[in-house]
Image (tube, helix red, strand yellow):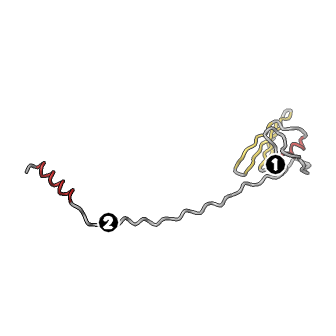
Amino acid sequence: MKPASAALALILALGACTSTEVRTPPVPAAVKPAPPAAPSVSAPTVSGPVLAPDGTCTGPAGGSATAIEPGIGECDLVRLKGKPPTDVLVGEGRAGREVQVLYTEPGAKELYFFVNNRLDRVVK
């Protein structure tokens, strides 16, 4: 028999073999349970009227603030200043509603930062 014929005969003979050996499927590793879902954190609530992007209040400014100080509401600032702001930027941040209110005065600019309708800080 020629070497090529012998190799072909060997391949055919091996291909005709059947095995009675039964293999068991591998056992899967222990499945870790999914971590519990993080508790949902609700956004802080904003109470009272707030400023719209055009500088108008969404409701009557019925606050009792008598001075511009930390903690007053957005519409209280406008009421105390007696005129609409030059510009208002409204957005959402990590703490919730964040608003920047700009007043341009002759020779100065005042920027008021609010978080959830409460005055946080003033930059003059």
Q: Residue 34's x, y, as percent?
A: 54, 62
Residue nearer the viewer, 28 or 5: 5
Q: Residue at x 73, y 50 (%)?
A: 96
Q: In the image, is 32 to the left or to the right of 61?
A: left
Q: Looking at the rendering, in which quadrant would you find the C terminus? A: top right
Picture quadrant of residue 83: top right
Q: Residue furthest top?
A: 106
Q: Residue at x 73, y 44 (%)?
A: 91
Report the label total. Answer: 2
- Compared with 92, 23 (above or below) is below
Q: Residue furthest left?
A: 1
Q: In the image, is 59 to the left or to the right of 7?
A: right
- Compared with 38, 54 (above or below) is above
Q: Residue 122's x, y, as percent?
A: 81, 45
Instruction: Assess disc 2: are there few (<14), some (14-19) or many (≥20) residues with their C-alpha within 10 Å of its C-alpha.
Output: few
Residue, disc 2: 23
Q: Residue at x 89, y 46 (%)?
A: 60
Residue nearer the viewer, 87 or 52: 52
Residue, disc 1: 119
SS for tag 1?
strand
Residue nearer the viewer, 26 or 98: 26
Residues at discs 1 and 2 in contact (Cβ within 8 Å): no
Q: Which mark is residue 6?
A: none
Q: CA distance from mark 1 to mark 2?
A: 72 Å
Q: Residue 30's x, y, as percent?
A: 46, 67
User: Which amino acid does the dot numbered 2 rest on?
Assistant: Arg
Of labels 1 and 2, earlier in sequence is 2
